[in-house]
């Protein structure tokens, strides 16, 4: 569904819902077999108890991308967009238009910058350094498997 | 701030935020000194990490009522409306206009019915029975200090 055919009301409602329950995340995994040694996976997700999954379906319909699946715990469902193309072409333009109002908006800006670097071909170590610098400023209250120094040491 | 002077965008954003993070609650406490033996306290609340308190201030501004205070844990802030008048005159009309989209909307309907019974003067035991029947259908996934039978036995 393109945004033009969706009511503004629903879009602003989703912006508010995402500001509370959504998460913009950049995750890193060491991959010795890759040229750049680190796999970088951006994602936007919203989790919800499975008895209240209606909103996840509205996200999927309005953003026209992403999947809904049980989370590790079987009591929750997770709406998630992992495709870089969908993030760049659908998710980021949506939240640029329907701006978050909490300080999560700063995470969103960092997330958006990382996605825009990732879409370049043939990332070099300077690009990776930039990504690590940006991503490690995000979600400061959350737990992080690898800190900035550890990530840079993997490059 | 009256709703007419607030943009629809903000109101729908708050509806979405509340659908994720808000809570409509009816709490009961035994009060032997009261004529009706049970104190019934309705409240609408939204909690948030204190580093992301902007949205709580928007709720307070737009709904034109309620307080923001540290929750029991010092890391969170809670926006809360406990005044029955404010709930009936401000909060309930807001969410009747900017409808929730998840199944939390059913909790809201039950909450609204309880508030409307509470505003009558001189509640009798039939009213209290109605309130208990309605309130114990709410927030079924949450913990409840007193179950329906226990509450009815207090009347």
Image (cartoon, coloured by chain):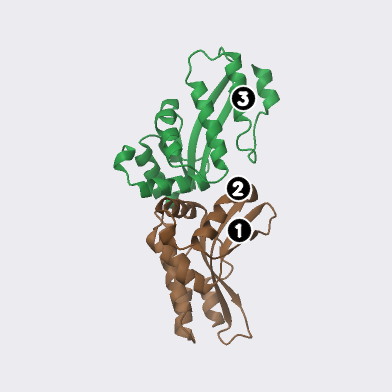
Chain colours: A brown, B green
- Which secondary structure, mark 3? helix
Q: Residue at x 41, y 56 (%)?
A: A100
Which residue is denoted by mark 2 in the rendering? A52
Residue B90 or B45: which is nearer the viewer?
B90
Q: Is residue B90 left or right of residue A128?
A: left
SS at badge 2: helix
| Front-lying residue, A132 or B88 | B88
Q: Secondary structure at mark 1?
A: strand
Location of the C terminus of chain A (image quadrant): bottom right
- Whether residue B99 is visible, yes or no, is yes
Query: Which residue has dot 1 on it?
Result: A78
* Chain to which the residue tagged by mark 3 belongs: B
Task: Give the camera-side residue of B17 and A103.
Answer: B17
Marks 3 and 2 close (CB-CB < 8 Å)? no
Same chain check for tags 3 and 1: no
- Circle 3 residues within 10 Å: few <14, some 14–19, many ≥20: many
Quarter where residue B66 is shown: top left
Which of label 3 and label 2 is nearer to you?
2
The chain to which mark 2 is attached is A
How many tags in the picture? 3
* Mark before the other along the chain sequence, 1 or 2: 2
Tell me the crowding category of disc 2: few under 14, some 14 to 19, or many 20 or more residues within 10 angstroms, Cα based: some
Q: Residue furthest front?
A: A5
Residue tagged 3: B132
């Amino acid at each position: 569904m393109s945004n033009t055919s969706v009511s503004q009301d629903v879009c602003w409602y989703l912006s508010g819902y995402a500001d509370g329950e959504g998460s913009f995340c950049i995750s890193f995994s060491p991959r010795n077999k890759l040229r750049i040694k680190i796999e970088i996976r951006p994602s936007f997700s919203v989790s919800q108890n499975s008895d209240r999954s209606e909103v996840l379906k509205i996200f999927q319909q309005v953003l026209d991308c992403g999947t809904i699946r049980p989370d590790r715990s079987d009591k929750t469902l997770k709406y998630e967009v992992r495709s870089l193309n969908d993030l760049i072409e659908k998710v980021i333009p949506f939240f640029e238009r329907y701006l978050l109002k909490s300080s999560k908006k700063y995470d969103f800006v960092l997330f958006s910058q990382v996605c825009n670097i990732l879409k370049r071909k043939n990332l070099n170590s300077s690009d990776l350094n930039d990504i690590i610098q940006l991503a490690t400023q995000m979600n400061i209250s959350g737990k992080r498997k690898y800190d900035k120094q550890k990530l840079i040491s993997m490059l």
